[in-house]
Image: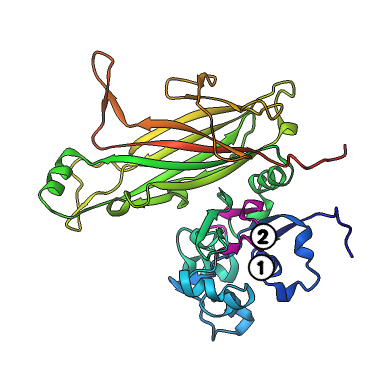
Amino acid sequence: MAPKDFRCYLVAHSMGGLVCRAFLQNPALDPGNMRAHVDKFFTYATPHNGIDLLGINTPSWLTAFDIDNFNRQERMPEYLNLKKAYAKHSRVDLIPEESFSSRKVFCMVGTNRLDYDTAAGLSRTFVGNGSDGLVRIANATLMGLNANGSIGEPCAKAFTFRSHSGYFGIVNSEEAFQNLTRFLFGDVRVDLWLDIEDIRLPTAVQVEADAGRSVNALYQIEVLASPRGKLWYLSRRTAEEDSVACVPHASWKEVKAQYLSSVFLANRAKVNPKRRSLAYSLTLGIRAPDYEIERRLWVNEHYEGGYLFRDALILEMVPPRNENEMWKVKYSWQGSGMLAAETVLDVKPLDKERVEVVVPFDSHTIEADGTHKPAFPGVKGSLRFVISAWNADLEMDG
């Protein structure tokens, strides 16, 4: 029997992540209740929602090499103990909160399919864009499942331009290693959300929309997050690497909030150990889309690779020393040069553990007199940072 204070971490790649989930979620596979001693769960490139080839989920009758293990209609709900959840939500990328807290899970996602050479490149061909060569990005993350059967909070996630495996695979990447160590032993957690308040169409396109014609577009959201003093990204999502978050114009009002990524920071990795604050840089880009009017491309004023909004900010955080203190958070946009974080943010407590700060942004043009004017096309919204102490109860030797 394990001692009461025994705690362990589960770190798994690919199918190993599903094996660990089965252990955590299915009581029939853990008669000794060892999951009670698991403190955190980290997955590399795991097909949490199965594997799709040519846009079709692997069928349950395809049993050669146990490929049916990635079938989400029949096989995965069985060993993940998610039959009821699948019947309700038609997905298996869910981890029940009553089995294991979604806040203790991290999903590392690969985005480079071109370096995955398995089956002479056939795998990356059949799986297609937006994947690591075997697992689609959309299938590589997890959500919490509440006790009432509703979808809960997203699990932490980050993205790196690496393939599923091999010499240039995700397990060998510096980015994945740094995320792993910070998730297991870091001190501050920041969950990043994008809230869209308004999207402004080009003037000519808006005229067509006002006339009742159907207008559509796909907004691509890029995010790059890098801690102070480091030469790599903790998370990297760009259009060229097929790893962006996407928001359709037709439904942006229904899906205003977008969970983009999580960043974990560690005091032991500070550039200056005497500095109390922890900081990182975040680049946000929202690409100008290919607008369609009545399903026909509108290219009159389109410039490929253009942005509705693109800027980087520095977020600097000072954790409280005790229960009577509050987090201190500052930021600065970097559009006018590399500036230290100077603007003090209002800190809103969410619960006993988490606080929230909001940084607004808006696409604008600068008039001759120096005043700002909303840009058309353009986007207005805010970055919402949910900040909390991490591993406050973890005592390490040495």
Whether residue 112 is visible to the viewer of this picture, yes or no, is: no
Q: Quadrant of the N terminus?
A: bottom right
Residue 394: mark: none
Instruction: Name which quarter of the figure residue 390 lies in.
Output: top right
**Horizontal and vertical percent for residue 2?**
88, 61
**Horizontal and vertical percent for residue 101?**
65, 56
Q: Which residue is mark 2?
A: 100
Q: Is residue 222 left or right of residue 63?
A: left
Magenta region includes residue 109: yes
Q: CA distance from mark 1 to mark 2?
A: 7 Å
Secondary structure beneath dot 2 equals loop
Q: Which residue is mark 1?
A: 25
The magenta stretch spans which residues? 93-115
User: Dots 1 and 2: beta carbons under 8 Å?
Assistant: yes
- Give the camera-side residue of 150 and 214: 150
**Horizontal and vertical percent for residue 60?**
54, 83
Classify 22 as above or below 144. Answer: below
- Give the camera-side residue of 53 and 23: 23
Whether residue 342 is visible to the viewer of this picture, yes or no, is: yes
Secondary structure beneath dot 1 equals helix
Q: Is residue 81 left or right of residue 273?
A: left
Magenta region includes residue 334: no
- Give the camera-side residue of 34 and 224: 34
- Give the mark nearer the N terminus: 1 vs 2: 1
Residue that protrudes farthest toward the top in the picture: 369
Crowding at label 2, few (<14), some or many (≥20) Cα neighbours within 10 Å? Answer: many
Query: Which residue type does callout 1 highlight?
Result: Gln
Query: Which residue type does callout 2 highlight?
Result: Phe
Q: Who's the residue at 52% across and 66% down the image? A: 149
Residue that protrudes farthest toward the bottom in the picture: 61
Crowding at label 1, few (<14), some or many (≥20) Cα neighbours within 10 Å? Answer: many
